[in-house]
Image: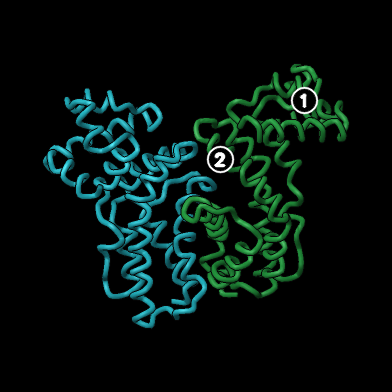
Chain colours: A cyan, B green
Amino acid sequence: MAEAATARRSRISPERAAELYDAVLDLLREVGYESLTMDAVATRTRSSKATLYRQWGGKPELVARALRHNKPASLADIDTGSLRGDLMRMATLQDDCKMEQDHALMRGLFHAIHGNPELHQALRQLLIEPELTGLDAMLRRAVERGEVTADNPALEYVIHMLVGGFAARELIEERTVDQEFLIKYIDAVILPALGV
Amino acid sequence: MAEAATARRSRISPERAAELYDAVLDLLREVGYESLTMDAVATRTRSSKATLYRQWGGKPELVARALRHNKPASLADIDTGSLRGDLMRMATLQDDCKMEQDHALMRGLFHAIHGNPELHQALRQLLIEPELTGLDAMLRRAVERGEVTADNPALEYVIHMLVGGFAARELIEERTVDQEFLIKYIDAVILPALGV
């Protein structure tokens, strides 16, 4: 199955795929996930709906792949030699303007997840799981370097602290996360909880 | 204005208001916020729509007041004499079954906030702000007792850590928060970040 999917996918060049992904993100920003149709993607990118379905399977996977393509880097690519360095690199991967744009996109998608299990599944597989794996590797290296003790109970809650920074910044403070906030939050909350 | 509102409100007995709030919560669970109508509330409670509007102003305020009525206690009512005691009391205010029921309700409402500024405003005023005030008082007492230093930078992020516990438990772990999780999370994350 996976090989067949790869073979199907290879029919579209990476440049053409990038064009399609950009168009999908534009449409997502304009109309939101619920109102985005494969017809609109086909029209805007002058492709056939049959090609889109053959290549991506459906709207949830196309959207998830477009978002993944849009990510500047993954946590798995970060390895500065210290935990604080890794977290600070994570906080500054995107400039504030890009972070605000992406945050608006992700907020809309987060709400669309509610009642769209296929979208949740696609985002989980293509966006969330790879970042969780990258975060686990980052924390494992910190333990191996002796920066964090292996039995520190906060190790399993780093993702909760991170999600809380983003969610409460929006829900309670009604502001968007920016680099300055992330840097302060990492130093005030995440590193102290880990005993660093 | 506030006095006029109180005078209007006093026309309905507390017992009758409690019945109405229970009916609103039942309808919320059955159909969700978007599909809940004042007509349905009026029919189910055998009241007139005019009475509901006169008493509560509209759907957002009626829903927010029903949720507030449903809360077993507020953070502002907790004062055990230690920060850990206060947080543990917070974690065990509701049993797991009630927590799961309420969590399903709040999840639906959280999604309805998106695109409903009046609902967001009503929830903020009647549910979020009182809890934030209660949390501030709890933390101020901890500082006054010398449990937390006044300049601890995590003090302003306790709400972020709490929101993250709930949000990531749902989004990443796809599980509901229960007492056992909250107790572990408080001991692993919140107290260590505050240096307790």
- Near-viewer residue (A59 or B70): A59
Q: Disc 1 designates what residue?
A: B55
Residue at 67% x, 64% y: name it.
B87
**Residue A15 at least partly seen:** no
Residue B171, labelled with which disc?
none
Residue drawn where x is 31% and y is 45% of the image: A97
**Chain of the residue under label 2:** B
A99 sits left or right of B64 in the view: left
Looking at the image, residue B11 lies above or below residue B173: above
Whichever of labels 1 and 2 marks the residue nearer the N terminus, that label is: 1
Q: Secondary structure at mark 1?
A: helix
Left or right, A167 with respect to B187, comes to left
Q: Residue furthest bottom?
A: A146
Q: Position of residue B78 (x, y in %)?
A: 75, 60
Using a 10 Å C-alpha cutoff, classify the residue at mark 1 as few (fewer than 14 neighbours), some (14 to 19) or many (20 or more).
Answer: many
Which residue is at the front of the view, A88 or B45?
B45
Q: Name which residue type carries label 2.
A: Phe
Residue B134 falls in image quadrant: bottom right
- Count of number-bearing discs: 2
Q: Badge 2 is on which residue?
A: B110
User: Pointer 1 indicates a residue of which chain?
Assistant: B
> Residue A130 appears at what percent x and percent y?
33, 57
Residue A134 percent location from the top left of the image: 33, 63
* Left or right of B94, for residue A79: left
Residue beneath the point at 36% across and 45% down: A122
Q: Quadrant of the C terminus of chain A?
A: bottom left
Point 35% across, 38% down: residue: A60
Disc 1 and disc 2 on one polypeptide chain: yes
Nearer the observer, B185 or B7: B185
